[in-house]
Image (spheres, rainbow, N blue to C red):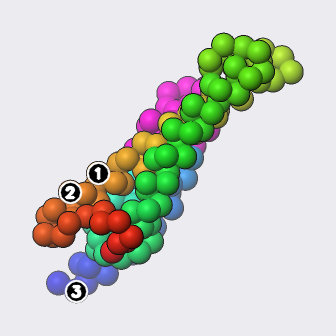
Amino acid sequence: MMVEKVLLRVIAKLLIPLIMLFALYVQFHGDFGPGGGFQAGVIFAVAFILYALIFGIRVARKSIPSSVTRTLLALGVLIYGGTGILTMLLGGEFLDYNVLGSTPLAGQHLGILLVEFGVGMTVAGAMITIFYTFAGHANGDLPFRIGDDR
């Protein structure tokens, strides 16, 4: 019985960095092929959910407290919206990426990268928050008490 837990932990420790690396690949190559912020956010969250399933929810909440997931949620939305506001301040319309770079192509690339990064952060934060909420209900805990990062 104990051997199974050791095997699961070793395999998880090998897989989690690879899952995160794949999430970064999907995030930063989403403008050239399939993928992008949403998919990368879900894949990144899966790494932490796997960690929580193998090592326990309390250990996972110590590595990424609920305050961090809420910050990811808010920061991702701010990056997305801030990119749109920046384009307006630079003389374009909301999310008119052409004004972000020296050429329209460079602006498009930078704008898509920023927006997709914001989406990825928001989705990762949301997925981990949803998991923590359901895991808290399953354990009989009341998750997300203010100032409580169990």
Which amino acid, by three-letter code, is at mark 3? Answer: Met
Q: Is residue 7 visible?
A: no
| Disc nearest the viewer among 3 and 2 | 2
Q: Secondary structure at mark 1?
A: helix
Q: Position of residue 8 (x, y in %)?
A: 30, 72
**Residue, x 57% and y 31% (percent of image)?**
81
Q: Position of residue 24 (x, y in %)?
A: 57, 47
Q: Residues within 10 Å of mark 2 (few under 14, many from 20)?
A: some
Q: Secondary structure at mark 2?
A: helix
Q: Position of residue 40 (x, y in %)?
A: 48, 42
Q: Position of residue 31 (x, y in %)?
A: 60, 27
Which amino acid, by three-letter code, is at mark 2? Answer: Phe
Q: Which residue is mark 1?
A: 130
Q: Which residue is mark 3?
A: 2
Among numbered discs 1 and 3, the one appearing first in the sequence:
3
The label number, if any, that marks residue 134 in the structure image: 2
Give yes or no for contact between labels 1 and 2 (Cβ–Cβ under 8 Å): yes
Which amino acid, by three-letter code, is at mark 1? Answer: Ile
Magenta stretch: give its range: 25-42
**Residue, x 44% and y 62% (percent of image)?**
67
64 up-or-down from 71: above or below: below
| Disc nearest the viewer among 1 and 3 | 1
Between the C-alphas of marks 3 and 2, the distance is 27 Å
